[in-house]
Amino acid sequence: MKRTGNVLGDFQLWIMVLPALAYIIIFNYVPMYGIQLAFRDYDFSKGFTGGAWVGLKYFKQYFESPLFLVTLKNTFLIAFTSIVFGFPMPIILALVMNQIRNNRAKKILQTTVYLPYFISTVVMVSIINIFLSQTKGMLSLLLLRLHLIGPNLNLLGEPGLFIPIYVISGIWQTCGWNSIIYMAALSQADPQLYDACKIDGASHLQVVRYVEIPTIVPTILIMLILSMGGILNVGFEKIYLMRNALNTSTSEVISTYVYQVGLRSSQFSFGAAVGLFNTLINFLFLLAANWVSGKISGTKLM
């Protein structure tokens, strides 16, 4: 199809893109009007836009809340730990799978590591509860037999173990699926570079270091920037299902706090203010990561 450079001439292309544009506008931009609830004293009787304008009242209420530092610290720790330990794992897995020359074995490995991604959050947490149950959990009993934990230790109720369990289970579930993009990036490596490595007698580690890692560095930086942009976006469903009365001190995060106070207590304006604060922090992290990446390597989103 020949491009004409104007909207009327390219109307076929615009028609093809129209469903995607409509989806983005309806589900991403139209709901942004609800941001104004964070600055109003919402009143059911006055409709969606009803209620007196109160400015930053609910932001101040959250900042002065005893749970402000607790939820902010827990959210940041969980997200930061997930990035530090979870972000490199798909890269390592992709590099390892790329070294496998047996296509059959490679396909079996890929299928095996991709499968956990398709397990729903509810089923995932159920598996965690079954394996780590204090009385009948397979992993709990194994650790007890190896004398790595005490007989009275409840792995699911110990506050100090909540983040490790959350991060490790997250890595197991998403590592394989997240490696796909790095496998795709590795497929773009110049075959002549591999031939040159064979001629020079380079080892597997040298091939990884001098050929494969430089090939995927731009992809790594882009994915890292996107990850930093969601540093305070901790999955609500998994944490809400994993939390209990014993581990609340480390499992209470911004998203669960918004649910408990904003929705269950019907404080919609307060919940909107906390959610907007969370989004603004993520946006600032995204801009900072994008700027640093652009300065250091020249790779950035915009």
Image: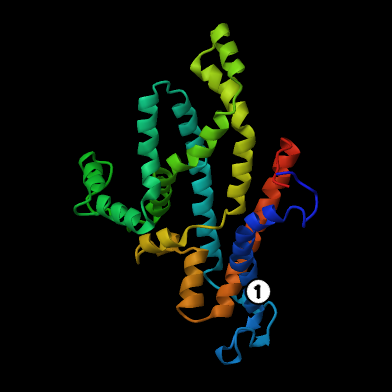
Amino acid type at circle 1 is Tyr
Which SS class for mark 1? helix
Q: Is residue 3 visible?
A: yes
Q: Is residue 118 above or below residue 263?
A: above
Q: Is residue 223 above or below residue 62?
A: above
Q: How many marks?
A: 1
Q: Is residue 183 above or below residue 132?
A: above
Q: Nearer the viewer, residue 23 or 251?
A: 23
Q: Nearer the viewer, residue 92 or 139?
A: 92
Q: Is residue 267 above or below residue 292?
A: below
Q: Residue at x 44, y 45 (%)?
A: 174
Q: Residue at x 27, y 53 (%)?
A: 153
Rendered image quadrant of residue 243: bottom left
Name the residue that disc number 1 marks. 33
| Left or right: where 163 falls relative to 13 | left
Q: Position of residue 60 (x, y in %)?
A: 64, 75
Rendered image quadrant of residue 188: top right
| Left or right: where 132 falls relative to 5 | left
Q: Nearer the viewer, residue 194 or 252?
A: 194
Q: Residue at x 50, y 47 (%)?
A: 81
Q: Position of residue 269 (x, y in %)?
A: 59, 79
The extreme bottom residue here reads 45
Q: Is residue 63 visible?
A: no
Which color scheme does this rendered protein use?
Answer: rainbow
Mark 1 Cα-neighbour bin, 10 Å: few <14, some 14–19, many ≥20: few
Q: Position of residue 161 (x, y in %)?
A: 38, 51
Q: Residue at x 22, y 46 (%)?
A: 138
| Left or right: where 279 falls relative to 204 | right
Q: Position of residue 205 (x, y in %)?
A: 51, 19
**The N terminus appears in which quarter of the rendering?**
top right
